[in-house]
Image: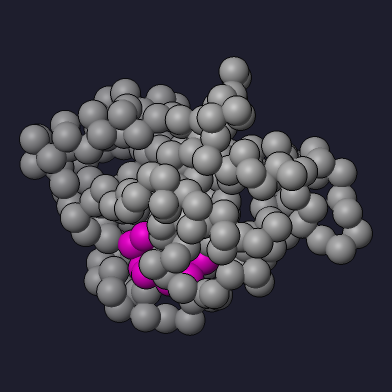
Amino acid sequence: MDLLKVYNRLYEDFGPQHWWPADSAFEVVLGAVLVQNTSWNNVQKCIDQLRDEKIFSPEAILSIPENVLAEKIRSSGYYHQKARRLRDVLSYFQQSAGGDFARCFSRNPETLRQELLALRGVGPETADSILLYAGNLPFFVVDAYTRRFLYRHHVRIDSKGQPDDFVLQSKNYERIRLFFERRIPRDVSLYNEFHALFVELGKKYCRKTSPLCDQCPLRCFNH
């Protein structure tokens, strides 16, 4: 499958998505942790509350007790775990670059990625979201919507022709990420928009249940 043709078809149908919805690198990091296993609507509620209560900086979040932070982000679900994860991630940026996100993202990207992955509760999707959307670094984000697209279009991710359910296994994240990165230009803007377009595709047509395959803008790629 020609992935650039897929991208162009989605862009033609949906237009630019203006994703990630954030005004700063800090806000991207905040959202990337909170959005784990929940919808963006729930994350937005947390962000709005933190902003309204003037707890909207790494320093402010790290200055309050973890249990208090957990209550502030309750609507994101798993809020005790996410409070710990958020503090760990923000502490990492504070310790590695004095809270200067731009300076931190200027370091070796692969080293930075491995350090993020070493943090408690930070998986590859969260790490790559932070690197792409906060750091403007070219790492393709693989999420459930991406996997669903690959699965339903019977896309093989290597020359061996792996079974269709291969792409649904989370342990194969890296191979799926590299599948995209090796087939399309390594470009931040392209990765940014492509990921957002897959999200929109998954919400509108390629739904988890009752997919609208006959209306999908990518139905032509089934042949």
Task: Give above or below for 54 relative to 101.
Answer: above
Residue 143 x %, y %: 56, 45
- Total numbered badges shown on the rendered structure: 0
Q: Which residue occupies 42% across, 45% down?
A: 13
Residue furthest to the top in view is 210
- Where residue 118 sits, quadrant-wise, is bottom right
- The answer to whether any part of residue 136 appears in the image is yes
Q: Is residue 167 magenta?
A: no
Task: Give above or below for 23 relative to 54.
Answer: below
Residue situated in front as seen by the camera: 204 or 181 = 204
Q: Which residue occupies 37% across, 60% down?
A: 133
Residue situated in front as seen by the camera: 30 or 86 = 30
Q: Which residues fall within the magenta stretch?
A: 133-139
- The answer to whether any part of residue 19 appears in the image is no
Residue situated in front as seen by the camera: 73 or 215 = 215
Task: Give above or below for 100 relative to 62.
Answer: below
Residue 173 x %, y %: 67, 52
In the picture, measured across the screen, residue 48 lies left or right of residue 169, that is left
Q: Give the overall secondary structure of the magenta segment.
A: loop
Q: In which quarter of the image is the C terminus?
A: top right
Residue situated in front as seen by the camera: 204 or 117 = 204
Q: Which residue occupies 42% across, 81% down?
A: 107
Residue 164 x %, y %: 81, 41
In the picture, measured across the screen, residue 168 lies left or right of residue 46, that is right
Q: Which residue occupies 80% across, 38% down?
A: 165
- Where residue 46 sits, quadrant-wise, is top left
Q: In which quarter of the image is the N terminus?
A: bottom right
In the picture, measured across the screen, residue 192 lies left or right of residue 157, that is left
